[in-house]
Image (tube, rainbow, N blue to C red):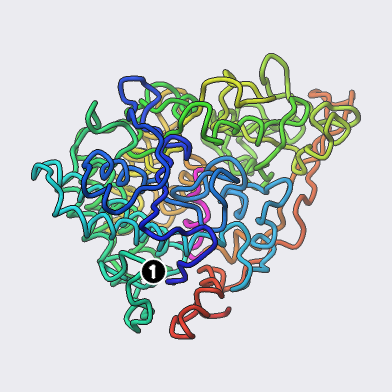
Amino acid sequence: MLNYKTKTMKPLKRISCLLVLSGLLFSACKKNFLDLNPTDRLTGTSITSDTSLFEAYVINRYLGEQVGVNEGEGSPPGFGRGFEYAMASSVTDESMYNTDNGSWLIEQGQMAANNTGFLGTLYARSYAGIRDCNYALSLINGLPLSTGHKNRLIGELEFIRAYRYQDLIRNYGGIVLIGDQVSQLTDNLQNPALFKRATIQESIAYATAQLDDAAAKLPLNNSSTWALGRATKGAAMALKSRLLLYAASPLYSAGTWQDAAAAAKAVMDLGKYSLSQNGYQQLFLSPNDNEIIFERLFVVNTARHVCMEISNGPNGYDGWAGNTPFQNLVDDYDMDNGKSITDPTSGYDPQNPYVKRDPRFYATILYNKAPYRGSTVDVYLPGGKDSNQGPSNWNASQTGYYLRKFMNDAYPIDNPWSVAGGQPWIYMRYAEILLNYAEAQNEASGPDATVYAAINSIRARASVNMPPLPGGLSQTDMRTAIQHERRIELAFEEHRFYDVRRWKIAMQTENVPAYGVSVTVNAANPSGYTYARKISLANRSFLPQHYWLPIPLTEIQASGGQLQQNPGY
């Protein structure tokens, strides 16, 4: 847990603050840029003697430093892994990463304490971020700042620290709560208290208390002085909603559904957020949508996030395939009449399978003959340009599908770094809050009118226009409907990995075969093609211990064996 002396960690007297070069941006709008000059290494003295540098240090805690990756190399650091290469979707039944990238061993149940694939840096990175927040909090009271400004920065640091704790809790369960005990490398790291894991209930109580205090200190709105991308009151409240929803879930059993419903309702009652009126697909391309509660933005032409298009695009367009959707997910999109494709009255045609589906399907997944960049996606054989008989065939999708969500057609696929651009990564949005409320309220009180209203508002949103859920559902039926809605609405946003675990259904969802589609030309069929399922990723496996990640072996060793490993590893 406290194995901080890694290759890339610097002593705090040489804090790296590469603000622009590391990809820090809090708005695509010029008026919201944080006009900061890139710096090299800052001493503790310079941070405490220059309040603008101190604030720059605080802002940079949204990024932190990715342990195990040298500066300027690999994926950008920061919260989560949802940027351009292997997403968390590719260790679920949503997708696979076409060329592995440390994801296949997780899908195939081969995780071990000494090998957790692309999730391996999460533990040390999170605690390094917590320590960095502690360091800033240990200095702030000595700075010549107004009380209001100081409180906002404290709230911001509390939010960032709580977000890091949230990441630890949802991956490892009960965690070590270091409080303010570690803020510098010179701190005594052999204190046994620093290796004692709290219970899940204690861990969530600590993080939510931090978020309550942060919400009281943070502004309601971003502004010219509190730029887009910085935490707000709503962001702190939304993160609390997520944590309390997890706490009430079967895997955690550390909270109540009533508390989870109340936390989500509190965000709704702010009256600040609403579902996007710009369309489901457009929502993920602009940082200024009123549905967005908290997002990460990127510096134009410097942050590597701008290569989303080349990382996930079809090979026939010079893309690298990246996170390719499974047939398992495709089959879960209903018809646009609200009926499942397994319903014989739905109108589904297995030889013309992409007609009249939930509109979110078309905004999320590229399929055979899908319109794309002035042409179509052609995965058929023989000869489809986006098949393994097309150009760069090593980049052809193994599932027969490509990712559509998050992709901006205004950016080039080939050499995407040559133009200005960079869509945001949304960590929290209002649809999640509505789904949180619906789930918690249904579990607490059954499917009342407010549950229906929350779910149906999402289904009826601009560009989706799906029919409302049928009335008279039982609590169990509504639970199934809500779980389905989360799968569709939040696809590829790195929720599925945690949802199937907290619901304790991963033994079912993660042990089924991972299917794709093979498409062959067939003039005898009305669509001109024959569609057949195929296995895309063999030997998927999920065992009971996989409900939690193993704590990295290096952290267990660094604790001298005092840190308790998760069961089964």
The residue nearer to you, when weighing 94 against 23, is: 23
Magenta run includes residue 499? yes
Q: Is residue 539 left or right of residue 87?
A: right
Q: Is residue 83 above or below residue 4?
A: above
Q: Is residue 443 left or right of residue 63?
A: left
- Report x, y in % for residue 562: 44, 85
Disc 1 crowd, CA 10 A, few/some/many (<14, 14-19, 20+): many
Residue denoted by label 1? 252
The residue nearer to you, when weighing 151 against 15, is: 15
Q: Is residue 459 left or right of residue 350?
A: left
Which residue corresponds to the image point at 32% horizontal and 30% vertical from the top-left? 34
The residue nearer to you, when weighing 242 against 529, is: 242
Which residue corresponds to the image point at 73% horizontal and 20% vertical from the top-left? 376
Q: Is residue 293 left or right of residue 128?
A: left
Highlighted range, magenta: 493-504
- Report x, y in % for residue 207: 28, 61
Identify which amino acid the numbered label 1 is placed on. Tyr
Which residue corresponds to the image point at 28% horizontal and 60% vertical from the top-left? 134
Which residue corresponds to the image point at 39% horizontal and 69% vertical from the top-left? 252
Q: Quadrant of residue 131?
A: bottom left
Q: Is residue 138 above or below residue 546?
A: above
Magenta run includes residue 458? no
- Report x, y in % for residue 69: 57, 53
Q: Is residue 269 above or below residue 29?
A: below
| Residue 449 in view | no
How many dots with numbers?
A: 1
- Report x, y in % for residue 342: 64, 44
The C terminus is located in which quarter?
Answer: bottom right
